Image (cartoon, helix red, strand yellow):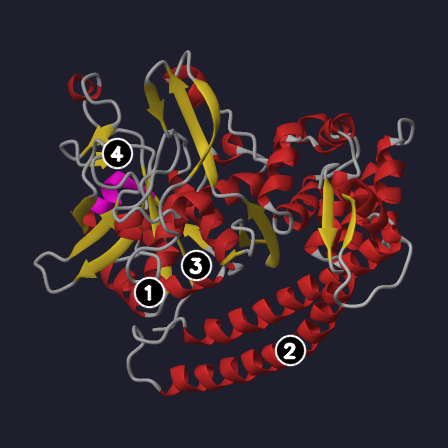
Amino acid sequence: MGSDTCSAYPERLRTYGQVGQGNDQDLVGAGRRLSAALDALVRSSPDPTLLPRFPDWGSDLQGYGVRKAQIDAWVGQVGDAFEEAAGGTFDADTEVFTSSSTIDQLLAQDPRVQDALKLLHQLLGNSVFMSMDGQFVAALVAQLHGMTPEQVQEVFWNLGDDQLKQLGVVLAIPFGTGVTLDERNAFVNVVLSTVDPNTMRRLMANMPDLEPDLRTHYLDHDYKGFNWSWQASAGPLWGPTGLPNPTEDIRQGDDGDCWFLAGLGAVGLSNPDLLRQHIRTNPNGTFTVTFYRDGKPVEITVTDDVPYGTKGTSGVQPYAHPGADGADWAQIYEKAYAEFRGGYDDIDGGFGDTSIADLTGRHATRQDPGDYSLDQIQQRLAQGYAITTGSKSSDAPWWEFWSHPDRMDNDQVVTNHEYYVQSVDTSAHPPIITIVNPWGAGGGAPKYVRLTESEWHRYFSEVSMARVGSP
């Protein structure tokens, strides 16, 4: 808060807090009833595009009521702190003047804040048994989970910049120091989803590793001399429909994560509502995305900032780009997945089955395309399967290979690249499979590729799939 003199009517603050908390319980109940009513309405509606977000309205109202109750409780505590700082009891018309630093000290006496600070000091003071760092972090996360945003912020404002830098070193993945990736991500989740923008800026300034590691060999090779930082994405999360639109919104950048983005596109085509439900906007503007490890959900919280490079007057966004309508959900998913795996360099190279499984928690398979006819692929699509397919290395003769080493089928197919399957037209003669390049429009290769069964079998080496939607 600083050290400037501040004033308040402590009795009024306490009263506002008490009355507010009572109203908040009614608000939460109303949200619960609204959610149930809207859910029933959705189930009875014949138009699936009209009402997909109705049940969320009730949940949002419940969340708002819970959050407002926390704020009202804190308002009452601030009133108590003002009264204690002034050394007396006052009526509703008495204004109290005191320093904000005194109020900070009184609020820091909150037992929960004190318990969290004790754990932090134990963690920062542990220079011998570093294998215990993970235990301290896990205990700290458990403590922070039961606290209000104001209490969490109070904890970190009671640490100096040097202490925050030290905490950042302890949590930094490359150094280890006894903290696992899951333990680190759990800490990042509870902090980034909670603190206000002012606290966030201070934490990021002293603990830059709260963001995923953005360095990859692509940056070193393709963008020599660029300076890298994080820049807030400018677009909305979703496009006009309020749902993912993979063929318009997925545009791969300069990371080798075609396999992940192809899986994202395939799931988005088969079950767009699953992707929408697996990304949550937090009250402070951050996003929490749900992935799966061994079939169990893992939440990852990230800011809306994306990697951005500058060199003189030039600027570039190196990884996934905004969608056609500015929708940035694919960028947020990519950033969260980089955090989930350990950094942007850790999502370079893979297969669609891994992506689909990590996005949905469903068991995914990877097989040779020769195991499937296009009739069978069409049947799988109709049954709600998300399907990706990966191309081979070039099979072109040497005189074509040297001029186009990364293309096949008259430059239509990118080699060693993952696509996602949009459709199969069995009424065509011969039947045609349409696959989508995650590079998107303007990526330097056709966005849509249409192949016969024999062409697909010739140019592609694997097909991955999992049932993620309803037929």
In the image, the segment drawn in magenta is 455-461
Q: Nearer the viewer, mark 4 or mark 3?
A: 3
The answer to which of marks 1 and 2 sits earlier in the sequence is 2
Direction left: furthest residue: 429
Q: Nearer the viewer, mark 3 or mark 1?
A: 3
Q: Main secondary structure of the magenta part?
A: helix
Judging by the rendered image, the residue that carries numbered circle 3 is 275
The image position of residue 97, as x and y in percent, is: 78, 49
- Going by the image, does 156 lie left or right of 25? right
The image position of residue 25, as x and y in percent, is: 66, 78
Judging by the rendered image, the residue that carries numbered circle 1 is 380
**Circle 4 sits in a helix, a strand or a loop, which is it?**
strand
Residue 183's label in the rendered image is none
- Vertical relation: 199 (above or below) 348: below
Q: Nearer the viewer, mark 2 or mark 3?
A: 2
Looking at the rendered structure, the kind of residue marked 3 is Leu
Direction top: furthest residue: 225
Q: Residue 458 in magenta? A: yes
What whole-number distance in Å separates the C-alpha atoms at marks 4 and 3?
27 Å
Q: Nearer the viewer, mark 4 or mark 2?
A: 2
Kindly identify the residue that appears in the image at 37 percent across and 38 percent down.
320
The answer to which of marks 1 and 4 sits earlier in the sequence is 1
Judging by the rendered image, the residue that carries numbered circle 2 is 23
What whole-number distance in Å separates the C-alpha atoms at marks 4 and 2?
60 Å
- Vertical relation: 382 (above or below) 418: below
The answer to which of marks 4 and 2 sits earlier in the sequence is 2
**Circle 2 sits in a helix, a strand or a loop, which is it?**
helix
- Going by the image, does 338 lie left or right of 417? right
- Mark 3 neighbour class, 10 Å CA radius: few under 14, some 14 to 19, many 20 or more: many
The answer to which of marks 3 and 1 sits earlier in the sequence is 3
Judging by the rendered image, the residue that carries numbered circle 4 is 414
